[in-house]
Structures are given as structure tokens and as C-alpha cells.
Image: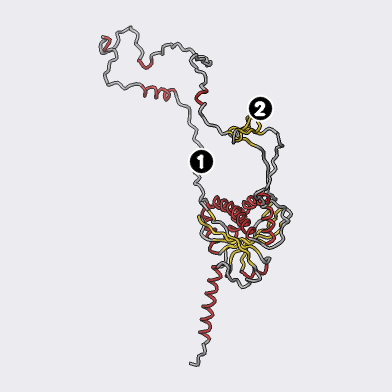
Amino acid sequence: MDGMLSQEEINALLNGMSTESSDSAVNETLTDAEKDAIGEISNISMGTAATTLFSLVNQRVNITTPVVEYATWKDIVNSYDKPCVFIQIYYEDGLDGNNILILKETDVKVITDLMMGGDGSNISGELTELHLSAISEAMNQMMGSAATSISSMLEKRVNISPPSSAVVDLYENMNGENIADFLKGNFVRVSFHMEIGDLVDSVLMQLYPFDFARDLYKQFVHATSMEPDIPTRPPVDNAPKKTQAPPTPAQMQQPQQAMMPQQPQGYNPYANMGYPPQGMPQGMPQPMPYMMQPMQDVNVQPVQFAPFSPMISGMVQPENIDLLMDVPLEVTVELGRTSKSIKEILDFSPGTIIELNRLAGEPIDVLVNGKFVAKGEVVVMEEAFGIRVTEIVKQKQLN
């Protein structure tokens, strides 16, 4: 042998390689039903997440219908901004796996600025730990509400662990180093068009491993196929009914005869009356059988009920208010109120003066168990503050 392979051996090797590659392709694809189910689940869960994000940024949030497709790490590098923020989400209960959310750097800055009370225009500078912490909390609440929606669809409890955020420079990591294992091959990419007021018009991406996507589809199909049993109606008989002729007088008498007691042969109903067995003497009227005796007249009158009038009892005792005298109530004195944004609160330091909504010398409010009952003024009693009640607020004034 000169070390050369024959044509048969070359064909065998090529056939083996094609079989292996086809198996790999099957493992990295989804059926049309699986893609539709993943899109439906993502659409519902992200709709709930958009509502949660609205409550955080106080801006209109719109996330459109998702697009499900396959992708590789090279596709992410070529189609997304650099740098961007990767948010890793792990499932603790209900689902086994993880997925990754990708947000643009500018989108993260806008969201965090809105969360801190800004107008979304403070997006200069680099991303800091404060930005990553804020976006992690936002994604924690968003994906937590999305997990609740998935729980309703799968009819089981689904929980996530707190997400972790990291800045990824796609230019420096074009070869896919230090990334999740499933991102090194083919994976499922779900893309959403996200709008936040007039500040953000961008694309939000969610990346799934194939195994996680298939498991999510199987549980979704299992939950939606468990329909309650519907009781079936009895079959309707549409055959023509036979018309029966009206009963004859002889047939109408048969039930009455059947109801009469059967007497033994030779029974003489008049024997107890002292008559001979042949019956009543001639000329005497024959008595009617006891079943045919006429019914006696019954005096029937309508029932009368006593009138339902309230009964006044002289034994009712007056309310004993003394039973409540020892019940403790919480008395609160409110000097004033104000509202601050998160950004202003974070700027608090020793010596900061907070202006309240009440003028100097104006009466302060006295609340009992949270209910406004009186007004007063502050006094000093030895070494403690006190309150001198100047006005009792009546119920009409409260209304």
C-alpha cells in the first residue's frame, strides 16, 4: 500500500462527515411550531415587562411583536452597537436554563437617568457601577413580572435569580472569548423593537440556548393541552313518536281495581254484621265498599300569619363605652411634608435643609391612628416637646 485512499474509502469518510453534520444541524434548529410558541411566550412576557418598565421610568413604553430567528456570535458582533450591556438571567424554579438580554449603552443611560428622576438627557460619560446596578434592578423587576406571566401560561411557579449586568465591548471580543458557552455556537435570537417615550427607539435582544427553547416549548404545549373534560349530552332521539289512543272507560277503571285490596274466595263482607253468608236480606239496600265511600267535607280556611312588627324590648342595655377606655391609640403629630426625587435624596448630607409645605407658625396636624382629628401648636415641657391642642376638627370639616 502506498498510503493512498481508494475511492470507496473516500466516499465512506464523506458520508460519515455528512451524517455527523446533519445531526448537528438538527440539534441547532427549531420546528415552525416551536418558533411560534417561543414568539408567543416572548410576546406575552415582554408585554408585562413593558408595563413594569413604565412604572419605573414614568414614560410610555412600547415593545413590539418579537422576531424569532437563529444567530451566531458573529451576527451579534456585526449587528449591534459597541459597547453594549449583557444582562444574564438564570431561572431558579419552574425552568432549567438561562438567557441573556442585550441593551445598547445609550439605552441603559437613558433608563437609569429616568429612574433617578432625570429627564433622560444625562447620557454623557462612560457607564459606571451605578448604571449597571440600576439597570440590573430594572431588569430584575421587568423579568420578574415576565416570569409571573410565564407562570400563568405554564400553570407552575417560575422564579428567576437576581440578574447580573456587564459591559461587553464587541470590538475587543470579536472572537467570542469569555462569553457564555451557548453563544459559541448557534442559538435562538428573539428581537424586539423598543420605544420609551421620545427618548429611545432601539432594538432589545433576548438570546436562548436551543435546549432551553425546546424545554420551554414542551412545557407550554403540555400546559395548553390540559383542557378540562366537557360532559357530553345524551343523544337526542329524533325518531317519530307513536301516538297512543285515549284510554277506554274499562281501562280507566283498571287502576282503581288494582288499588282495591284482594279478598280471599268466599269472603263475606257482611259476616261481622250478623248476616248470613249469602249476604244482605232481600229488599235491604246494599252498602257501598269502603274504598268508594264519599269523602267528608273538611273545613278549609287560609292560614293567617302574625304581622312582622319590630319588637321593642325594655331590657336593652345602653352601650358600655367603658369597655373601650383601655384600648391604646397611636397619636402622631405631623409638622409638614414634601416630595423629593431619588437624585435629590441621594444628594442628602449632614447639614442639608429640607423645606416643608407648611409655613412657620401655622398650626400643625394631630392624627390618631392616621386620622386627622385636631390642630395644635408646639410647646416645650421641661426637656421634651409637646403639643397644645388649639382646635378639634369636626367630622363635617373632614368631609
Q: Nearer the viewer, residue 4 or 284?
A: 4
Furthest residue toward bottom? 2
> Residue at horizontal 27%, vertical 18%?
267
> The residue under label 1 is which amino acid type?
Val
Residue 257 percent across, percent down from the top left: 37, 22
Disc 2 target residue: 391
Residue 51 at x, y percent in the picture: 64, 50
Element at label 2: strand
Query: Which mark is first along the chain, 2 or 1?
Result: 1
Look at the numbered discs 1 and 2 and tell me whether their residues touch, using CB distance below 8 Å: no
Query: Which residue is more in the foreground, 131 or 136?
Result: 131
The image shows residue 56 at horizontal and vertical percentages of: 65, 50
Up the image or down, 36 lies above or below 308; here it is below
The label on residue 280 is none
Q: Is residue 339 left or right of residue 217?
A: right
- Residue toward you, 237 or 31: 31
Colour mode of the rendering: secondary structure
Question: In the rendering, which numbered label is found on residue 236?
Answer: 1
| Above or below: residue 188 compared with residue 288 | below
> Is disc 1 placed on a helix, strand or loop?
loop
Res. 32 visible in picture: no
Label 2 amino acid?
Answer: Glu
| Residue at point 54%, 71% (across, down) | 24
Q: Is residue 330 above or below residue 9?
A: above
How busy is the neighbourhood of tag 1: few (under 14 within 10 Å), some, or many (20 plus)? few
Query: Where 250 falls versus 357 (above or below)?
Result: above
Quadrant of the drawing holding the C terminus: top right
Category of crowding for the residue at label 2, using alpha-carbon neighbours closer than 10 angstroms: few (below 14), some (14–19), many (at least 20): some
Q: How far is the residue under mark 1 from the one under mark 2?
A: 79 Å
Quadrant of the image occupied by residue 18: bottom right
